[in-house]
Image (spheres, rainbow, N blue to C red):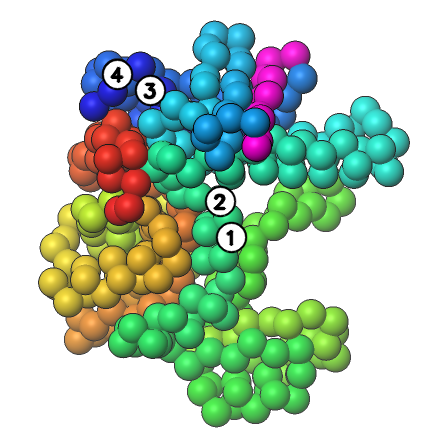
Amino acid sequence: MTEEKPVLVVTEPNDVTADMVITHLNRLGVPVARFNPTDVGVALTVSARFGSCPAPVAGQLRTPSRTVNLEHVRAVYWRRPVWPAFEHLEDADARFAAAQVRYGLGGSLYAVQNCLWVNNPLRNAAADYKPAQLAVAHRLGLTVPPTLVTNDPDEARRFIRAHRRVIHKTLRWTPYERGGVGLTSWAEPVHADELTDTVRVTPHLFQARVDKVADLRVLIVGRQAFAVRIDSGLLDWRKDYSVLKYSVVDLPTGLERTLLAYLDHFGLVTGSFDLAVDRDGEPHWLELNPNGQWGWLEEKTGLKMAAAFADLLARGEADADV
């Protein structure tokens, strides 16, 4: 392990989960450079060179506390970065400036490939499409609830009538406000007579409801799996964390192997899987969050998740092909 090579932690300022990992990296004596893309300007500077040096990309990234040589990065922990919006500029100027940061700073970082990425954001993006997730899960032999993605209200009504107990889920979570109040969408029951022609405006995801008794959240870090059963009685357990009950469980060998293969398919090092457990104890695929939250699960269960991330990042490029 090369001590002088730092780990880059790219995330928002108040990220408690990243703090947990950094604490373990500090204990391991691994240098850390933490920054957020919104710091660009006064608190973050990048100078990347291409074509004039032996390395594919060389140069420096500078924060107020550390200077990092891009060709000597141990690992990149891509957590919860926030890109600048340049709200003080006119709309056209703000869009232009934001694009330059995303493709200049982001592009320069993505070019750094001689290290471990947890996860590479380009691979996160590819894995974040629910229809693609469903197809891969089915291909790998996981039980996938019958699902329809459509903007045809008649197709949707036929699907709901055929499967009777159906839920609607968003295809992608996005920040949403109405009247200045932040709103969050959950998995909700849906009935055929509720649908209107507004379904035509965008594709919607309809899914046969699993007759579940519990949920299963599986975090994989490198090749290490942490599985937690969540009992709640709720259709969507995220609605009320106060009623959740947690228990650590062991995954069947076949299921663990399949979830690892799922990450390998997308070239991911980590991911948070959600599955529903039916009355026979069989898991049903719900979704993968390539960059899901897990800090509260460590707090509730005592599982050493943050330490696993720190160990993986500390090994860095030695395990870059994980």
Q: Using the image, determine if residue 309 lies above or below residue 232.
A: above
- Nearer the N terminus, badge 4 or badge 1? 4
Secondary structure beneath dot 1 equals helix
Which quadrant of the figure contains the N terminus? top left
In percent of the image, x 25 and y 69: which residue is there? 283
Spatial separation of the CA atoms under disc 4 and disc 3: 6 Å
Q: Kindly identify which numbered label has been placed on residue 176.
A: none
Give the magenta part as a residue range. Answer: 42-51
Q: Is residue 183 left or right of residue 164?
A: right
Spatial separation of the CA atoms under disc 3 and disc 1: 27 Å
Secondary structure beneath dot 2 equals helix
What percent of the width, then of the height, locates residue 243? 33, 48
- Which residue corresponds to mark 4? 3
- Please name the amino acid that badge 1 sits on: Ala
Q: Is residue 129 left or right of residue 141?
A: right
- Which residue corresponds to mark 2? 121
- Nearer the N terminus, badge 2 or badge 3? 3
Q: Using the image, determine if residue 187 lies above or below residue 310.
A: below
Label 4 neighbourhood size at 10 Å, few (<14), some (14-19), many (20+)? Answer: few
Q: Which dot, 4 or 1, sits closer to the camera?
A: 4
Spatial separation of the CA atoms under disc 4 and disc 1: 31 Å
Query: Do the residues under discs 4 and 3 have CB atoms within 8 angstroms?
Result: yes
- Which residue corresponds to mark 3? 5
Q: Kindly identify which numbered label has been placed on residue 125.
A: 1
What percent of the width, then of the height, locates residue 83? 62, 33
- Please name the amino acid that badge 4 sits on: Glu
Q: Nearer the viewer, residue 261 or 152?
A: 261
Query: Do the residues under discs 1 and 2 have CB atoms within 8 angstroms?
Result: yes
What percent of the width, then of the height, locates residue 258? 23, 65
- Please name the amino acid that badge 3 sits on: Lys
Spatial separation of the CA atoms under disc 4 and disc 2: 25 Å
